[in-house]
Each structure stands twice: as C-alpha cells, then as structure tokens.
Image (cartoon, rainbow, N blue to C red):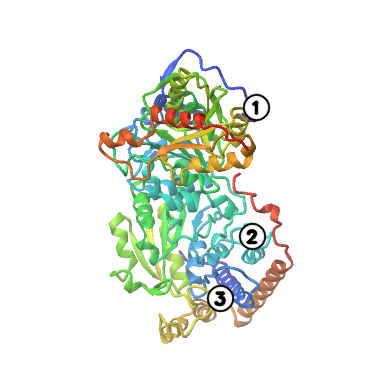
Amino acid sequence: MELTDEQLLAMHRSMIRIRLFEETAGKVMETGKMPGFLHLYVGQEAVAVGVCEALRVDDYITSTHRGHGHLVAKGGDLRRMMAELMGKATGYCGGKGGSMHINDLSLGMLGANGIVGAGAPIAVGAGFRNKYLGTDQVSVAFFGDASTNIGAFHEAANMACALHLPVVFVCEHNMYGEYTPTNKAMVIADIVDRAAGYGMPGVIVDGMDVVAVHEAATEAVARARRGEGPSLVECKTYRYFNHHGIQNLGLKYRPDDEVLAWKERDPIFTFEAKLIDTGVASRELLDATWAEIHAAIDEALQFADDSPFPAEDQMLAGVYS
Amino acid sequence: MSAADVPLPDPGEREITYVAAFIEAVKLEMAADPDVFIAGEDVGAHGGVFHTFDGVQTQFGERRAVDTPISEQAIIGLGIGAAVTGLRPIVDLMFMDFVLVAADQIANQAAKLKYMFGGQAKLPLTITTVGGAGLSAAAQHSQSLEALFCHIPGIKVVFPSNPYDVKGLMAASVREDNPVLFVLHKRMLGQRGAVPVERYEIPLGQARISRPGSDVTLVSWGKTAADSLVAAEQLAGEGIDVEVVDLRTLSPLDIGTVVESVRRTNRVVVAHEAVRFGGFGAEVAAQIQEEAFDYLDAPVGRVAAPFSPVPFTPALETRYVPDPARIAAGVRAAVARPLLGR
C-alpha cells in the first residue's frame, strides 16, 4: 500500500515528538527534577511510529518499561506525559504511575509495564475481547528481545495462537537486555525463529526504517483484522542511550563504535533524506516541524513544571474503584 | 440502593451443595450479562477438575466457556486484558497453589493496575480457585495461600464456608469492579446447605456471626469456619458458649464485627487452615489488640497449621489441618486462662 505524503509527514512528526520528548525528559532527569527510573526510547522511534500508524485509535497496545514512545505514537498528550514523569497531579496517572506505568486507556494504550514480558498476556486479553465481541479491532504487544526469554511471553504467544486471537506481536530487537548483549542470553540471532514454534507467521524488518516497519505492521494488522490470527514482526533496532538515563558512549557492556554505526542509520535523519530526495518535503518544511515540536515540548515541560504534586489525601485514591 | 442495603433472602428449604451453589451463581451472572465469560484449564467440556464449572459450556457454548492452555500467567493476563477493555471475566486457576505460578499477573498487574493508572481504570476480574488440604494432594496441591493476597493492596479476597455464602459472594464478586480472588475449599465442595433459588449478593467485606455466644469469640473463614461451628457445639456441651464469626471476605476485612463481638465476650481465638506463622490470623489478632486491648481477658489465641508444607500421608495430614477437636482445644485454653490481678 502506497503511503500518502500526509501519512509520511505524520510519521516524521510522530518520530520527532518521541525524540524530543525523550531527550528533554533525559535532560530534566539530569537536573534532579525528575524522580525514578527513565528508560528512553531514542533510536527506536521508527518501530512505535511505523506500527501505530498502521493502527486505529480503537486498537489496543501494550507496552514495555521503555514505553513513552508507544504512547506518543498512539497519540499521547505530551503535557500529561511530562507531568506524569515528574510525578505531578496533572499527569496521566495522577503522578502515581510514573514513567513505567504511563498509559491512556482512551487511546487504547493499556500501559507501559515495569515487569519485562508482562504486557504480552494483557494484549492477549484485549485480543480475546475483540474476538469475543466480534469487532475487527486488533491488539498489539510491544516487547523487547529479552522478554522473549520470559515465561509470560511464551504463554501469551502460544495462547494467542491456540485461541486464534487478533494479536500482533511486535518485537523491538535492540540487541541488549538491560546491560547484557542478547547473544549472551539466547543462542538464536532472530526472535522471529520463535514464531514457527507457536504456529504464527513472522517477519524480520529493518526497525530503523519507519516505512518498512509500517508495511510489515500493516500486513500483520490486516491479517489479524481478517480473523486470521496472530503474527510476529521483529524489528531490528537500537537504543542510543543506556538502559536507564542518557549516557550513550563509554558504557562497559557495549562498544562505542557500535553505537556510532547505528546512529549513522538514524530512523529520523535517514527518513528525512528520503522525504527530501523524493520531493515529499523540503528541508525548510522539516525544520519547521522540528521547531514546532520543540515549542510543544517546551510547553509540555512548562505545564509539568507549573503543575502541583498530588496532595497526600490522594495516597489511597484508586487502590480500589 | 447499594447491595449493602438489600436484605439477604431467607435460605429457604432447598438444599444444594457448595459446588452447586457456585455453579448456580456463575450461570446466573453469565445469563444476566453477556460480558461475563469463564476461561481456564479444563473448564469447558470437562467442567473443571473439581466440577466447579459443570454444565457451563453446555449452557453457554465454547465462546463463553473457554478451555485454555496450561498457562497460568496468560490465563490471568487474558482476564486482565479483557477486563480493562470492558468485559467481566471469570478466570480459573485449577488449584490455589497455582496462584504462585501466576503471581506476577495477579499481584503486580491486576492488583496494581488501577492505582498505577491514576484510578482511571476499572478491572472487573474474578479469579476463582480451589484451595485447602485434606485430599492427600500433598504440598503443591493443598495450600491455603490467602494471606499472600491479603497483603497486596488492590485485590479483594473471598473465602466462603457454606453454600449460601458461596452463591451470594460469587454474585457480588462478579459484579465487583475490582479484582477478586475467590477461593473455594476442596473439602467443602460436596457439603450441602439451604440456598435460595433466586440471585442475591452478599456484599464483600461483611463478616457474619454464624453462631451467637457470650463466653468467647471464635474467628475463622473457609472450611475452618464450618469446623468452628462443630467445635462450638462440642463446647456448648461443656458449658462454654462460643460466638463464631465467619469473616467470609478477608480483604477488605470487617474488623468491626470482630471487635464488637470481642468487646462482649472478652476472649477470642482465631482459627485458620493456613500455617500459623505469618498467617492472616496474625493480622486479625493485631487489629483486635489495637481496637479492643482493654476488653481482653486473655491473649488472642490462634489455631492453625504447623509451619511445614502440607504432608501427603493421611497419617500426618489429618494432624496438620486444624479440626474441630483442635479448634475446641484452642478455645478451651483461651477460656481457661485466669484473670490475673492488676
């Protein structure tokens, strides 16, 4: 399916929203104003954007501890996101979830998740719901390469296939499970090899190429919508920053030249070159998008800064409905 | 009018079993609400290994009575994902011991989801399971693990002792917008009792005085609450008038009913089938001393299992599980303790 210029520019915009949100969050964390852990999505933008552009607003996604990008790509409100990361009452979770539990049920975003692999069974539940009600909605489980070594992932993948549910499993293979190279944690190079074991089709795609991701996701989503069951899309990608925080070079567990080589294939900059080469956009237009989103992020940050922390009487609110 | 305000129906004449009361509740909820379904291992055609879902698939079909793979984490995940997107699932874990296999999905996901999401989500999920010892099922198929989940904010824990309560509590659990762990006791399944034909709800978080008495309060739940009534009858013959409080729901805990009773009787024993150390009885005892210290004429007594896995051989298992005789002994000890001069 040929993408329209409008779709291409929307994907460009969405990737920049993620990039600048994450870079800004990282800087704020360095100042000490942002509590907790921060697992940044920079480098992987093409995956969330390519997949979510293939989804409708009423489709469901489950996410990971590196989940900001998925919510941005699903249409998340940058102001409420930044406020949540800063623990403010105006945040998506009223300041009670933070980075690892950010969500927007109205956008079908069923939550980032602090437990590796735990989102996949929940995506299966949302897929079950869709089939049960006879809708054509799908659910997507985003997960990392390392989570495929966890029992919950296997259970979810098998159950989705056994019950023939409209679920798409999207693996973000970024080569590291926290601080351990994936090739020390499993002997297969490609997660897609696992798909056959569950009886679903799988495809490998360049996770730095938003158009390629979109194309693969579109096919998998269409298959699920048609009631033909789950598929697995493996996106080969890379996170620029450390597992947590914003250091990117000089890390003991990965070589700097590897980081620099992946950055040469940056999902946003390579895509911009294509947009210019193919006459979809001018440099000026793309620069204007960056400037516009810079302003939106600044505004989100201001909103978060200005927002109050939740009052102590909110401690118990929401433990039960 | 909230469920708490509705008077409970008279039990009537009809007697059915504990498991039949459960199935009746499940079927009534499924008939009333198309969003209610059951999923779990062998719950479909087979009706569950303990026959807790007998006839459900026959009546409601495979779409609404779903056999799953043996995948406890994914079973709970299926329930969470379906509940947060608008359905009202009943998902079953074959044995209570298997809650540990699914612990992340229950404790880290289901119980915390609403809170982590800033309260915006509803999670109407009922997790059913069968717990308890007494069938020589050994250490991995006999546990009473309710205390673990009482320690987790965000999930409710229900453990009924009789058919009447099973039916009413299950109806309330399914209609609950929070996750509920609903525990049946495997040795109670065939116990008969009077149960109304119609649908009714027993509100969660309300204990019941199942036997009024004046000398000593005996607090328990599940099968132990039934055994406590037997113990109370024995003790009545000895001139000890026992008031039995059946908690029915452990979380939220109706400590008010317990404390009110203790203030009248001035002596109290908590009995449960789980191991004594770190058991839920410890929480009940602690709250009693916080709320009624000045009314106590003796320390809060506890009757519970020893601190070991459940043994296989009947020779040991029958000594492991508190029975009416041991419960009665615990009550006698609490009553016999003299008041010391102060």
Picture layout, residue B8 above or below residue B159: above
Residue at 43% from the left image edge and 20% from the top image edge: B234
Check disc 2 and report the residue beneath it: A95
Front residue of A54/A294: it is A294
Check disc 1 and report the residue beneath it: B5
Q: What element carries label 2?
A: loop
**Chain letter of disc 3 in the image:** A
Pinpoint residue A61: horizontal percent, then vertical percent.
50, 56
Check disc 3 and report the residue beneath it: A280
Q: What element carries label 1?
A: helix
Q: Are marks 3 and 2 on the same chain?
A: yes
Discs 1/3, front: 1
Q: Distance between the residues labelled 1 and 3?
A: 66 Å
Residue at 56% from the left image edge and 75% from the top image edge: A280
Pinpoint residue B277: horizontal percent, then vertical percent.
44, 46
Pinpoint residue A210: horizontal percent, then vertical percent.
48, 71
Q: Quadrant of residue A262?
A: bottom left
Discs 3/2, front: 2
Picture layout, residue A193 above or below residue A257: above
B120 on left or right of B69: right
